[in-house]
Image: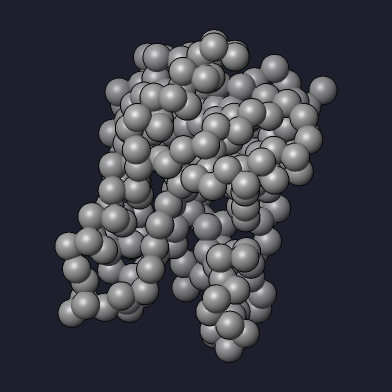
């Protein structure tokens, strides 16, 4: 029997990379998974790759109407949620002097506002003893130049976890943040090999993480293995944020 046997999970932005690897692992461990993505072609590809026990719902986590449609689909098909991995996020490199209102609103609109309402709108379907995981980043505690707005948006998730676990304690719903370091996903391809080598040089083990390493950490936070883990920020970064 898998660690998530009989559980229903929702994972946003799970058409590639870390979230897709997590969705695949959750299904392998017995869960039924609802995944989202903005592009239908990519969403269909992800559903086909996962292969079974999965429903794809096209939508943007920054859109409250899309979130309503997602949870209505979950309500009709399964009627409950045991696990939520709020994975959708956005970031770009931009200096303080160059920050625009549009950049700020786009970043906080998805990473903070979108995460908040992704969680809030899931609550009516959430089962007691459930698990909420938010996708953070080591940028939330590190002072990376050109990532000020992104880092601040991820730091806000850490604050959410502290508050929400107290609000949800009577329902025994755990709230944790999973904060990756540099993970080797297609999202890094536009930066080129030189930038990738620079990223590697910052990691104590000398190589970037793999999406599967994020997935196993997410499985830990979603399963009963972490039943006494609540309100933490779990860094999965090869040690980058610890030095």
Q: Is residue 161 above or below residue 192?
A: above
164 sits to left or right of 220:
left
Q: Position of residue 128 (x, y in %)?
A: 48, 14
Picture quadrant where residue 5 is located: top right
Q: Residue at x 62, y 64 (%)?
A: 185
Up the image or down, 132 lies above or below 96; here it is: above
Give the residue at the far bottom of this rendering.
194
The reply, left or right, for residue 95 in relation to residue 92 is: left
Q: How is the image coloured?
A: one colour
At x 46% / y 47%, what residue is drawn?
Answer: 88
In the image, 16 versus 137, the foreground residue is 16
Asked if residue 230 can be seen in this view, the reply is no
Q: Nearer the viewer, residue 240 or 150?
A: 150
Find residue 222 and report its image quarter. top right
Q: Quadrant of residue 224?
A: top right
Determine the residue located farthest toward the right in the rendered image.
1
Q: Is residue 36 visible?
A: yes
Q: Position of residue 152 (x, y in %)?
A: 28, 59
In percent of the image, x 61 and y 43: which residue is there?
43
């Amino acid at each position: 029997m898998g660690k998530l046997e009989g559980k229903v999970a929702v994972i946003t932005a799970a058409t590639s990379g870390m979230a897709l690897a997590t969705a695949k692992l959750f299904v392998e461990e017995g869960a039924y998974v609802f995944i989202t993505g903005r592009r239908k072609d990519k969403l269909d590809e992800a559903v086909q790759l996962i292969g079974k026990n999965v429903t794809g719902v096209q939508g943007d986590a920054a859109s409250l109407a899309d979130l309503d449609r997602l949870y209505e689909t979950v309500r009709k098909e399964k009627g409950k949620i045991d696990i939520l991995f709020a994975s959708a996020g956005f970031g770009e490199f931009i200096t303080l002097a160059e920050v625009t209102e549009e950049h700020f609103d786009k970043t906080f609109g998805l990473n903070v506002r979108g995460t908040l309402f992704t969680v809030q709108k899931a609550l009516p379907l959430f089962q007691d003893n459930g698990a909420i995981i938010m996708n953070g980043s080591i940028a939330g505690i590190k002072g990376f130049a050109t990532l000020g707005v992104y880092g601040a948006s991820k730091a806000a998730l850490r604050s959410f976890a502290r508050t929400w676990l107290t609000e949800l304690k009577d329902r025994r719903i755990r709230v944790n943040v999973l904060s990756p370091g540099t993970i080797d996903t297609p999202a890094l391809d536009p930066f080129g090999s030189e930038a990738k080598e620079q990223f590697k040089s910052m990691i104590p083990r000398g190589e970037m993480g793999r999406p599967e390493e994020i997935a196993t950490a997410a499985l830990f936070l979603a399963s009963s293995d972490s039943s006494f883990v609540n309100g933490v920020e779990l860094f999965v970064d090869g040690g980058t944020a610890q030095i």
